[in-house]
Image (cartoon, rainbow, N blue to C red):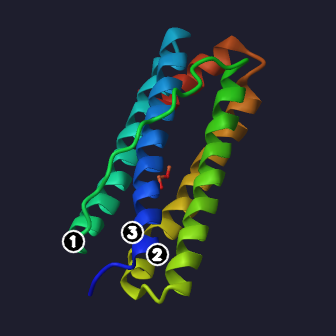
Amino acid sequence: MELNQKVATALNAQLNSEWNASYVYMAMSAYFDDLDFNGFGTWMRGHAKEEMGHAQRIYDFLVARSHKPHFAAIAEPASDFTSPTAAIQAALEHERSVTKQIYALFDLAHAEKEYSTQNMLNWFLAEQVEEEDLFQSILKKVEAASESKWHMFALDREVGGG
Ligand code: OFO
């Protein structure tokens, strides 16, 4: 069945938003690597890759529904922050804004009776719960460690899996 045009346009905007998220996290990775917090840098790059995976999911869905994906320009992301805590806080805020985008998409798909789009978006709804929870827990750890360089470098190792 032909993909509803309004939903196709909104999904394409989300495709772009996922690439934007990837770019945002790559810039955060550069911020952490520049501070020699390479564990955080590696973790952020891993997250940037996940966002590309999210974009790929939407791409695949659009193609399967015979809609050609369009790649719009991506805005320059922030790469300077007042502190590691501020950077992780910004990442959490970013995830919260993506959650709102997914909710709006779901509402639209529901209103337009796009059942298979709603089914595809269920994966994103679950993913956003996980992502907000992950960033929230890292934020709590950074807040707790931020007073001491020693604790920050220990956390950096933990976050980087080292
Ligand atoms: Fe980090 O979230 Fe995509 O969708």
Q: Is residue 62 left or right of residue 12?
A: left
Whether residue 161 can be seen here? no
Dots 3, 2 in contact, CB < 8 A: no
Judging depth in this view, the residue of 114 and 40 nearest the camera is: 114
- Please state the horizontal and vertical placement of residue 83, each as a whole percent of the image: 71, 19
Tag 1: amino acid: Ser
Judging depth in this view, the residue of 145 and 24 nearest the camera is: 24
Q: Residue at x 22, y 66 (%)?
A: 63
The N terminus is located in which quarter? bottom left
The residue positioned farthest toward the front in the image shown: 5
Q: CA distance from mark 2 to mark 1?
A: 21 Å
- Please state the horizontal and vertical placement of residue 61, each as a whole percent of the image: 28, 68
**Which mark is in front, 2 or 1?**
1
Tag 2: amino acid: Asn
Q: Under 8 Å from ligand 1: the CB of mark 2?
A: no
Q: Earlier in the sequence, mark 3 or mark 2?
A: 3
Secondary structure, mark 1, is loop
Whether residue 156 can be seen here? yes
41 over 112 or under it: above or below? above
Dots 1, 3 in contact, CB < 8 A: no
> Which residue bears the numbered disc 2?
122
Q: CA distance from mark 1 to mark 3?
A: 10 Å
Judging depth in this view, the residue of 48 and 157 nearest the camera is: 48
> Which residue bears the numbered disc 1?
66
4 over 94 or under it: above or below? below
Q: Earlier in the sequence, mark 2 or mark 1?
A: 1
Q: Residue at x 47, y 89 (%)?
A: 113
> Which residue bears the numbered disc 3?
8
